[in-house]
Image: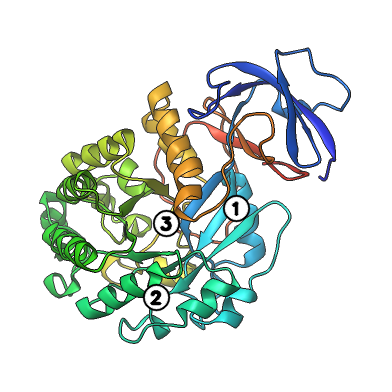
């Protein structure tokens, strides 16, 4: 619903960068901007958004890594269903990976993204033509068309020289290069984390080494070439420590973790539920703890849904034949809260899905403060989510607690 002026009554601010952090306030928004913030019950002159009363308020959440079936596989997800699912997940922005059919590796493909009132797509262009890891794609043209980063999604850049050239070239475009660190030659048939659960289940292993050897390589290339490197999909404790050390040395490196790796462990695969057949795989509890520590101390910059919706044909089969991936964009926050919903965890969540993504993508700052653009998410850590909008059938069955309640984007007021 479009509203020019409205009041969010008695909302509890969760925004570490706001002077109102931790306070309950009324927020008056007009013409797509916060005009006033005051004590509950003191602001008047506009209608109240009733369903927002008593909810938590933060800058709008950004899902920095998600996929749509469109174009090419609309049976998995359409733009419409993804936009609806993003709203239910509390996201006002969604970064779309380029692994579509055809690949989003040129300017027309970037420009073809449809517009929605309640969600903004962040175009991520392919790093190489056809995601083949060889010749660089039309990076400058895609950047001019609005691409804010470049990635081959989960197609690792195998050639070191290609990654070097990409980092050097992207510096002049003020865009980051995203790399998925996975040495598939170490696990060509791997389908699960190398551990006791894979051994008991008879599944081919994916060792932590397959990730850490690429993290080490990519950091070395970035140190040599310069430019901004983003390591996408960390899952191992050793990877977190290498990124921590690289940042301490002043290297321009960032990283993300998928929500699945924060809430699930490799013991989940013993159910043979193909919804938890993921890439990177669910790791052990020590790795999971390291990922949480990385988010809480800022070593890992972003939490991403890694939304990858599938249809029955791809997932309703035996484990070895099933595709990797899970539909996650709607449940991301609920899973997170089911593990931790204390104040430090909520502050870390807001940093990882609201503030740092805006920095890495070069978007404007948003805070709960007078003069800020209207781009906010309302949520309830004790709420309950029901139903689904995504077409993806591959939703893991982890415990849930809390939910997004609605979003504010410019003058668009949307209840989840």
Q: Which residue occupies the foreground of this view, 160 or 182?
A: 160
Residue 400 appears left or right of 55 = left
Q: Which residue is mark 2?
A: 127
Q: Is residue 33 above or below residue 55?
A: below
Residue 83 appears left or right of 139 = right
Q: Quadrant of residue 320?
A: bottom left
> In the rendered image, is residue 128 in sight?
yes
Residues at marks 2 and 1 touching, judged by CB atoms closer than 8 Å: no
Q: CA distance from mark 3 to mark 1?
A: 13 Å
Q: Is residue 399 above or below residue 172?
A: above
If the image is split into quadrants, where does the N terminus sit?
A: top right
Q: Which mark is residue 369?
A: none
Q: CA distance from mark 2 to mark 1?
A: 27 Å
Residue 197 placement (x, y as % from top left): 16, 51
Q: Is residue 170 above or below residue 360?
A: below
**Residue placed furthest toward the front:** 172
Q: Which residue is mark 1?
A: 85
* Mark whose residue sits in front, 3 or 1: 3
Q: Which residue occupies the foreground of this view, 49 or 30?
A: 30
**Residue name at image x 27 percent, y 64 percent:** 226
Residues at marks 2 and 3 touching, judged by CB atoms closer than 8 Å: no
Q: How many numbered marks, from 0 up?
A: 3
Label 3 neighbour load within 10 Å: few <14, some 14-19, many 20+: many
Q: Secondary structure at mark 1?
A: helix
Q: Is residue 129 above or below residue 46?
A: below
Q: Earlier in the sequence, mark 2 or mark 3?
A: 2
Q: Quadrant of residue 264?
A: top left
Q: Earlier in the sequence, mark 3 or mark 1?
A: 1
Q: Which residue is mark 3?
A: 306
């Amino acid at each position: 619903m479009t509203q020019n002026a409205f009041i969010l009554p008695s909302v509890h601010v969760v925004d570490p960068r706001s002077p109102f952090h931790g306070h309950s306030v009324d927020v008056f928004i007009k013409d797509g901007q916060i005009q006033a913030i005051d004590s509950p019950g003191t602001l008047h002159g506009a209608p109240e958004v009733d369903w927002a009363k008593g909810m938590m308020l933060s800058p709008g959440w950004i899902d920095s890594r998600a996929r749509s079936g469109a174009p090419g596989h609309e049976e998995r997800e359409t733009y419409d269903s993804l936009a609806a699912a993003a709203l239910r997940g509390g996201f006002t922005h969604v970064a779309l990976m380029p692994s579509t059919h055809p690949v989003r590796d040129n300017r027309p493909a970037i420009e073809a993204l449809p517009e929605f009132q309640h969600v903004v797509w962040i175009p991520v262009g392919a790093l190489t033509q056809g995601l083949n890891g060889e010749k660089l794609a039309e990076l400058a043209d895609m950047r001019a068309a609005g691409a804010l980063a470049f990635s081959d999604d989960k197609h690792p850049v195998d050639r070191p020289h290609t990654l070097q050239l990409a980092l050097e070239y992207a510096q002049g475009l003020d865009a980051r290069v995203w790399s998925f660190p996975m040495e598939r030659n170490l696990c060509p048939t791997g389908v699960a984390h190398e551990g006791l659960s894979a051994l008991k289940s008879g599944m081919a292993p994916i060792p932590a080494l397959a990730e850490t050897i690429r993290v080490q390589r990519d950091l070395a290339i970035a140190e040599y070439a310069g430019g901004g490197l983003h390591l996408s999909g960390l899952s191992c404790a050793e990877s977190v420590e290498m990124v921590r050390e690289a940042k301490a040395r002043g290297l321009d490196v960032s990283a993300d973790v998928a929500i699945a790796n924060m809430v699930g462990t490799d013991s989940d695969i013993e159910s043979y539920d193909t919804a938890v057949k993921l890439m990177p795989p669910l790791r052990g509890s020590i790795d999971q703890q390291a990922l949480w520590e990385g988010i809480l101390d800022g070593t890992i910059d972003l939490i991403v849904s890694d939304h990858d919706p599938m249809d029955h044909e791809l997932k309703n089969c035996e484990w070895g034949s099933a595709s990797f991936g899970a539909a996650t964009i709607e449940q991301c926050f609920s899973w997170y809260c089911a593990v931790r919903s204390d104040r430090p965890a909520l502050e870390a969540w807001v940093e990882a899905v609201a503030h740092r993504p805006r920095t890495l993508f070069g978007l404007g700052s948003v805070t709960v403060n007078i003069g800020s653009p209207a781009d906010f998410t309302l949520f309830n850590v004790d709420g309950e989510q029901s139903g689904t909008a995504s077409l993806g059938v591959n939703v893991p069955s982890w415990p849930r607690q809390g939910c997004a309640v609605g979003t504010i984007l410019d003058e668009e007021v949307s209840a989840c």
